[in-house]
Image (tube, rainbow, N blue to C red):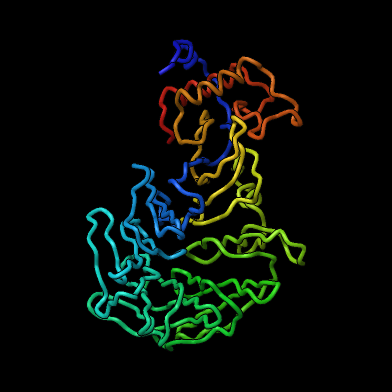
């Protein structure tokens, strides 16, 4: 470790400065492959599920341990990870639908499992699983199951208590409630129907022809579904949604159709880009992004976000990585986006410290003047103090 003695001597100077940025931004290498994306997140944001649909491959990424490879199987686009990150669901050829306890690698199977079955959603507590086969679509709870639809479907979401289920089935999207049964939603093509954790709201992207709409529904106490707003939007698909259905990630189409070019919708705010999403908290995705980042997963607090982004590294290389932004963490001195303040950060800081003044905005790198930790316009002794304190502890809080 570099840890020059000058850093320790500097700690005695009493200077109080603001952090370099609000929130903690991390860039995480993807596992091998090309088309992986973040499919889900545990409630506390410490676990991600990353899937590679074309190879039936998936991984769990944990803040404490990095990647854990999951068995080759077909995993849901979204909704396949339990709230605590300990269970996943999917389907395996010749084996059928399953629920997997990741730590023990123990499988559970539904009562009417068949080789063609596939689990497509798990409730946040892991107790309820939605699976589908040629015999229909079933809600599985322990030793019992309920047929909720007579046909196979593609995706689903389940409320906390298992009382409300969203079913995305192409042109046959529906909501099933324990009280009122299956209710068709009268949509165009829908890939996924998101259901809020409390079961009171649902939303979906309705892809009809050359245009799309975000559709919203309310679920009453008696299980009846009422259609709500429709919002025109120029997108090609949806990413992840927050557990309360107040935020949804959307993939902009970049086509000249009317409608906003956005990467998320938020209740009470409307459509916006990832920059808009983080700006109120002073957070950002540093670097030169050459496509709008995809928002794939959101924590239960609506304060931790993850997805994938294509951007240019400090070395000028184009790459795709997972990004993870925690709006409730701050780590001054963390300059390489790995949640550590270590020798790699020292190299970045030392290079900036030797030049003293930040370059003019038009001459800055895509990462800006991020070693200017107190936002004074200079990388000077005051920034040195802030960096030294962080470098002395190494781990971000």
On the image, the x and y values in percent for residue 177 come to 42, 83
On the image, the x and y values in percent for residue 325 come to 52, 46
User: Which quarter of the picture shows residue 96?
Assistant: bottom left
User: Which quarter of the picture shows residue 161?
Assistant: bottom left
On the image, the x and y values in percent for residue 382 come to 59, 20
Can you see residue 325? Answer: no
- Frontmost residue, 299 versus 167: 167
Residue at 65 percent of width and 49 percent of height: 291
Q: Is residue 214 above or below residue 186?
A: above
On the image, the x and y values in percent for residue 155 come to 46, 72
Residue at 63 percent of width and 33 percent of height: 367
User: Which quarter of the picture shows residue 208?
Assistant: bottom right
Q: Is residue 136 above or below residue 29?
A: below
Q: Is residue 311 above or below residue 301?
A: above
Residue at 54 percent of width and 30 percent of height: 335
Can you see residue 143? Answer: yes
Q: Is residue 302 above or below residue 6?
A: below
In which quadrant will I find the C terminus?
top left
- Frontmost residue, 378 versus 335: 335
Residue at 22 percent of width and 55 percent of height: 104
């Amino acid at each position: 470790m570099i840890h020059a003695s000058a850093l320790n001597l500097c700690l005695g100077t009493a200077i109080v400065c603001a952090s370099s940025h609000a929130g903690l931004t991390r860039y995480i290498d993807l596992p091998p492959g090309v088309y992986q994306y973040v499919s889900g997140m545990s409630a506390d944001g410490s676990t991600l599920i990353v899937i590679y649909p074309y190879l039936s491959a998936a991984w769990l990424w944990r803040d404490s341990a990095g990647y854990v490879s999951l068995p080759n199987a077909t995993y849901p686009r979204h909704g396949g990870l339990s709230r605590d990150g300990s269970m996943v669901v999917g389907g395996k050829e010749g084996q059928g639908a399953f629920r997997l306890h990741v730590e023990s690698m123990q499988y559970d199977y539904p009562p009417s499992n068949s080789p063609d079955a596939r689990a497509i959603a798990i409730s946040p507590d892991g107790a309820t699983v939605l699976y589908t086969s040629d015999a229909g679509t079933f809600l599985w709870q322990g030793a019992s199951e309920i047929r909720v639809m007579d046909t196979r479907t593609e995706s689903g979401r389940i409320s906390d208590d298992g009382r409300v289920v969203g079913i995305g089935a192409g042109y046959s999207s529906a909501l099933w409630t324990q009280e009122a049964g299956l209710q068709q939603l009268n949509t165009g093509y829908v890939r996924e129907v998101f259901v809020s954790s409390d079961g009171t709201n649902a939303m979906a992207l309705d892809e009809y022809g050359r245009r799309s709409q975000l559709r919203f529904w309310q679920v009453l106490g008696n299980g009846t579904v009422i259609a709500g707003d429709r919002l025109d939007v120029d997108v090609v698909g949806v990413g992840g949604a927050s557990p309360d259905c107040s935020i949804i990630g959307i993939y902009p189409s970049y086509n000249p159709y009317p409608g906003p070019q956005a990467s998320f919708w938020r209740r009470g705010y409307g459509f916006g880009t990832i920059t808009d999403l983080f700006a109120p908290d002073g957070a950002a995705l540093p670097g030169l992004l050459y496509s709008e980042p995809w928002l794939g997963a959101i924590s239960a607090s609506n304060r931790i976000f993850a997805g994938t982004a294509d951007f240019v590294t400090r070395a000028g290389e184009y790459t795709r990585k997972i990004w993870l932004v925690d709006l409730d963490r701050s780590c001054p001195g963390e300059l390489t986006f790995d949640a550590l303040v270590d020798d790699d950060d020292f190299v970045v800081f030392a290079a900036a410290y030797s030049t003293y003044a930040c370059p003019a905005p038009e001459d800055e790198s895509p990462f800006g003047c991020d070693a200017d930790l107190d936002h004074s316009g200079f990388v000077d002794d005051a920034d040195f103090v802030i960096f030294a304190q962080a470098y002395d502890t190494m781990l971000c809080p």
